[in-house]
Amino acid sequence: MSDVNGVAQDQLRSFVERIERLEEEKKTISDDIKDVYAEAKGNGFDTKVLRRVISLRKQDADERNEQEAILDLYMQALGMAPAVQE
């Protein structure tokens, strides 16, 4: 492995090339996801809601419940939702 000014060129080149390959794969996957959303939209699905559903499925139930409770609290504080009667 050649060494220029303390930098292992072969190792550096390997890292850069791996990152470049992964970035290309990421772009391809991103394009595929975009195509699926376009297909869903073409079939009458609301893509904003679909994205929200995907986001919610990534969370566990406790995290979802906590976020919903905070959202409800904020909406009530802003007069956007009816107050909870106890």
Image (cartoon, grey):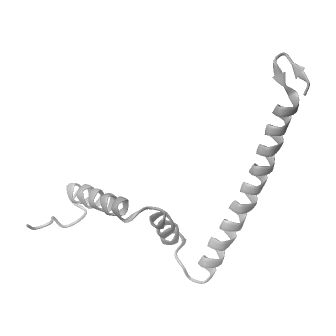
Question: In which image quadrant can residue 85 be found?
Answer: bottom left
The answer to whether 2 is drawn above or below residue 64 in the figure is above
Q: Residue at x 80, y 45 (%)?
A: 18
53 left or right, relative to 73: right
Taking the spot 88% from the left edge, 19% from the top edge, the residue there is: 4
Tell whether 68 sits left or right of 76: right
The residue furthest right is 2
Q: Which of the two residues, 44 or 64, is positioned nearer the viewer here?
A: 64
The picture quadrant where one finds residue 36 is bottom right
- Tell me which residue sits at (37%, 65%) in the image: 61
Q: Quadrant of the C terminus?
A: bottom left
Give coordinates of residue 56: x percent, y percent: 44, 65
Residue 73, image x, y percentages: 23, 57
Q: Camera-side residue: 4 or 20?
A: 4
Q: Nearer the viewer, residue 79 or 34?
A: 34
Residue at the outermost front position: 1
Q: Which residue extends farthest left?
A: 86
Residue positioned most to the top = 5
Relative to 84, is 40 on the left or the right? right
Image x and y of residue 63, in percent: 36, 59
User: How many dots with numbers?
Assistant: 0
Give the residue drawn at x 91%, y 24%. 2
- Measured as percent of width and height from the top left, residue 39 is found at 65, 77
Q: Quadrant of the N terminus?
A: top right
